[in-house]
Image (cartoon, grey):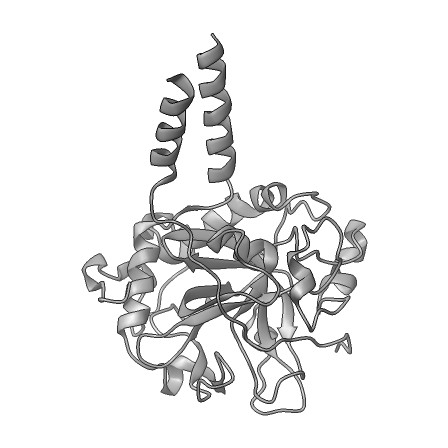
Amino acid sequence: MRHGSVLVAIMATLFASQATTKQVPSALKAFYNKARSGGDCTGADALQNGFYNTEWSGGHTTYCTKYLPPGKGFYLKGPGSDLANMDIDCDGKQSRGDGRCKSSTDTQGQTRWGLKHLEKHGVRDLNANIHPYVVLGNEGSYSPTFDPRMVGVEPLSIVAVVCGDELVYGVWGDTNGDDNEHPMVGEASLALATACYGPSISGNSGHDEADVLYIAFAGMEAVPARAKWDADSYEAFEDSITAQGDKLVAQLFGDKSTATGGSDPHHTSASSIDSDSDSGNDDDDDDNTKHSHKSGGARRSTIPRVCHIILIALFALA
């Protein structure tokens, strides 16, 4: 019985950890590979170009709609096979942290949308230690700038993030502001980055590789309907938006029979992307934010969690 109890406890820990991320659906993975192998985002596919993934990247990252149905959203696309990296944002409330945000040198006490939109939910602001938010949009005295609201993306709406072989849902919670020489993109809260790449992530140590896919969904249907904004953990908040995120992904990338709305016969539908296309590269004046791009985030182990749990269980039962 003792061994059985140990095994049950270990398995419970496993499933609790797995609840924070999920495997990327095959159709979304096909889109990921298509986006990476499709080259630069130019012409009518580029909502706005000229952004920097890092200070030294040359300003070739674009708010892109290539391969997406018209009016459904956008993603960040760098040159060639690049997408975007993931630097760390620690803005907003600072409670419930484990100290990893202390290394950030540009933390600000307010996010772009938190105070204005969350007060009605009894929450003062987003918390980078709890809320998996993404930084999108560029506003400041530099050029170019870009406002996602101009293409129908609503503040605090759900954003799908593909990092490695995992899918994490976040919300559009902050914007890139004026504290860099160049207009920067590619940033997420500590909570979201930790879900992607583990606890080695910190306020000044993110994920350098430009292999992260951020998909912002347009329309009011992307605004969380049952988000637990007052959650006291990342897991609790993520769980509250996952079902709606799954629905958005299914509508955009899933089987046509489950998608809503019509399609443009002259535009490539995301749901029609062949999985064989895999490439070898797998009115507000709130305080604006944003941060210089950092580096050094380690990838999560590629060994499946189930293998870890089996090994642990065997040792426990020995």
In this rendering, does residue 133 appear at all? no
Residue occupying the point 71% across, 77% down: 288
Q: Point out the image quarter for the C terminus.
A: top left
Residue 148 point in image, percent of width and height: 57, 74
Residue sitting farthest toward the left: 276
In this rendering, does residue 186 appear at all? yes
Q: Nearer the viewer, residue 191 or 299?
A: 299
In the depicted structure, whether residue 299 falls above or below residue 37 = above
Residue 313 point in image, percent of width and height: 40, 24
Number of numbered callouts drawn: 0
Residue occupying the point 50% across, 27% down: 12
Q: In the visual, does 215 lie left or right of 31?
A: right
Q: Nearer the viewer, residue 282 or 294?
A: 294
In the depicted structure, whether residue 3 falls above or below residue 45 = above
Q: Nearer the viewer, residue 70 or 184?
A: 184
Residue sitting farthest toward the top: 1
Question: Where is residue 94, by image quadrant?
Answer: bottom right
Residue occupying the point 52% across, 55% down: 200
Residue occupying the point 39% across, 38% down: 305
Residue 49 point in image, percent of width and height: 46, 86
Question: Where is residue 109, by image quadrant?
Answer: bottom right
Q: In the visual, does 311 lie left or right of 203?
A: left
Residue 4 point in image, percent of width and height: 45, 13
